[in-house]
Image (cartoon, rainbow, N blue to C red):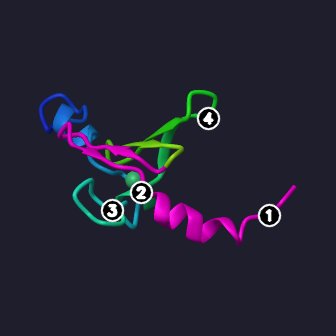
């Protein structure tokens, strides 16, 4: 909070307001962060830590770095999915 304006600093608003805080974009469990904006029809979600998570598990980090989809993990998890 900015003591002069009473408003949140721009830098501060980018940080997680959750308690406990969501994982940072640099953390390995970054995709466990809260979803701020979900666009399932477009196949992506914006997470609390600024990471864009794609439905194929690919990720785009706030730094501009992209993380390839983890297809091996998806295939391993597929057997546990409900078939409805
Ligand atoms: Zn958060």
Cβ at disc 1 under 8 Å from ligand 1: no
Say whether disc 3 or disc 2 marks the residue closer to the N-terminus. Answer: 3
Work out how far the residue at label 3 is from the one at label 2, CA to CA, in angstroms: 8 Å
Secondary structure category for the residue under label 4: loop
Task: Please say if 81 is above or below 33.
Answer: below
- The answer to whether residue 61 is magenta is yes
Work out how far the residue at label 2 is from the one at label 4, CA to CA, in angstroms: 15 Å
Image-quadrant location for residue 23: bottom left
Point 83% across, 60% down: residue: 83
Kindly identify which residue carries mark 3: 23
Kindly identify which residue carries mark 4: 40
Please indicate whether residue 6 sits to the left or right of residue 75 in the image: left
Work out how far the residue at label 4 is from the one at label 3, CA to CA, in angstroms: 22 Å
Secondary structure category for the residue under label 2: helix
Kindly identify which residue carries mark 2: 31
Q: Nearer the viewer, mark 4 or mark 1?
A: 1
Q: Nearer the viewer, mark 3 or mark 1?
A: 1
**Cβ atoms at labels 3 and 1 below 8 Å apart:** no
Residue 44 lies, in percent from the top left, at: 50, 36
- How crowded is the residue under tag 1: few (<14 C-alpha within 10 Å), some, or many (20+)? few
Residue 50 lies, in percent from the top left, at: 32, 42
């Amino acid at each position: 909070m900015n003591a002069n304006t009473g408003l949140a600093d721009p830098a501060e608003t980018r940080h997680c307001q959750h308690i406990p805080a969501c994982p940072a974009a640099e953390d390995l469990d970054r995709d466990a962060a809260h979803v701020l904006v979900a666009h399932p029809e477009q196949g992506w979600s914006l997470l609390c830590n600024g990471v864009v998570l794609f439905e194929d598990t690919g990720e785009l980090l706030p730094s501009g770095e992209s993380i390839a989809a983890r297809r091996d993990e998806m295939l391993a998890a597929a057997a546990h999915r409900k078939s409805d």
